[in-house]
Amino acid sequence: MKMKKYIVDTMPEAMKLIRNELGQDAVILSTKTVRASGLAGILRKHKIEVIAAVEDDKEQQKEPAQVPPAAIPTMPRAAVPEAYRKAGSLHVNETAAQPLSKKNDIKPKATLQYKTQESEEAPSLPAELQPHPEGADFSVSSRQEKQKGEMEAGSLTEKLLQEISQMKTFMATIAESQSNEASLPGDLNEIRTKLKDQGIATDIWSNWMEFAKGTLQESEEEAGESIVRPLIEGFLSERITDGINESTRIVYVAGPTGVGKTTTIAKLAAEQMFKHKRKVGLITADTYRISAVEQLRTYAAILGIPLEVVQSPADTIRALDHLSDCDLILMDTAGRNYRNEITVSELKSLLPDEADSELIVVLSLTAKTEDMLTILDHFHKYGTPKLIFTKIDETDTLGALFNVLKQYPSKLAYITTGQNVPEDIMLPDPKKLADFILGSEPS
């Protein structure tokens, strides 16, 4: 028997070489995947090693005459796996018919000639029981190819749907932009520009513009502000509250770093003492920031009010007992990254859930609207806090205030206007805020 080894890229290439060199009676003995040699093992490609054999000429003379090559039907590539299956079935049947003592002498005779007649097909077996001759290495079956095609089609469909959605969003943005730039009667064009420059969300001011446009008479060239101003004041009036409730005994003050929280607590303490004649006590849990305790201790000494420092929930309970004779207790919490929901949940777990308590979240008007909304989204999972906006003196825009109040049901309790304690804090005034929006800073 004559044997030869081939290193090729594909099985069709191997079969062509075998036919040309060993003839049509060649038998494939084995196939396996190998790596071609490369530079230090780098950039080596996968190859297929095929070992084929053919009987010597003397043995071939004893075999029946073979069908001339021209008479061999050309097999489509997709039919090759099925042909191997049939050949394997015939091989199994022939082996079973031989005496037990001669089974080991049987030689593989899976030649490159395939019978395709209907009458010669072996009985069909379930896919999982069908024999697979040694040397037949088909890495991707027709079913896998079908599944791959379905997955690719699904991926393409999903991609097309995403592109369609993006196109619809883009077209809606263009349509909205064109609508926003449409000419309005009277002084509404100027007012619309002011509202946009303030950073107020489009869905808020566009409703005001639609109402004013429908109300404004053509003869009233400069009456637009008289229509829009009440809309702004009405929006704010529905979303403000009169500071701290009289029935509240404990106020937990929270907020991200850098918003002026400790200074705001000192302002709240002074406002409650001098304006509402309440006895106030302070608790601070802000032991993370250097000198934070000393800053609040200085304010407490100036105001002549007690201060307790806590580091755990147990400390908080003891501090509340020490301040039991106070009408109002203000607790300063540590400034943290409250854009993280876990941080918010940790804070909430440290605060006693008292019936006469409330939570106030301090936000800076110099921050981005998106960050404020993320913070409040986490806090609103545990209740509805009141809001204090700080640093109105450090910005020219109030759009974030309107956007936050539109998005969440929280009430606006205070606005701070500077660093001075205790005077730079005020209850929100819709008229002053409307003046700010429309071009006049609050007095």
Image (cartoon, grey):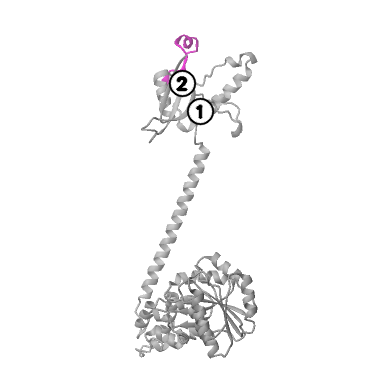
Mark 2 vs 1, N-terminal side:
2
Q: Is 408 covered by the magenta stretch?
A: no
Question: Residue 436 lies in what quarter of the image?
Answer: bottom left
Q: Are marks 2 and 1 in contact (CB under 8 Å)?
A: no
How many residues crowd mark 2 within 10 Å: few (<14), some (14–19), many (20+)? many
The answer to whether residue 208 is seen in the rendering is yes
Q: Is residue 157 above or below residue 1?
A: below
Q: Nearer the viewer, residue 252 or 411?
A: 252
Q: Nearer the viewer, residue 177 or 278?
A: 278
Q: Is residue 53 above or below residue 409?
A: above
The answer to whether residue 353 is seen in the rendering is no
Q: Nearer the viewer, residue 382 or 23?
A: 382
* Magenta segment: 53-72
Residue type at mark 1: give it: Ala
Question: Residue 419 lies in what quarter of the image?
Answer: bottom left
- How many numbered circles does the render carry? 2
- SS category of the residue bearing label 1: loop
Residue type at mark 2: give it: Ala
Query: Mark on residue 136?
Result: 1
- SS category of the residue bearing label 2: strand
Q: Is 55 covered by the magenta stretch?
A: yes
Q: Position of residue 23 (x, y in %)?
A: 42, 18
How many residues crowd mark 1 within 10 Å: few (<14), some (14–19), many (20+)? some
| Side of 216 where 330 appears, left or right | right
Q: Nearer the viewer, residue 126 or 340?
A: 340
Q: CA distance from mark 2 to mark 1?
A: 12 Å
Query: Mark on residue 52?
Result: 2
Residue beneath the point at 35% across and 79% down: 193
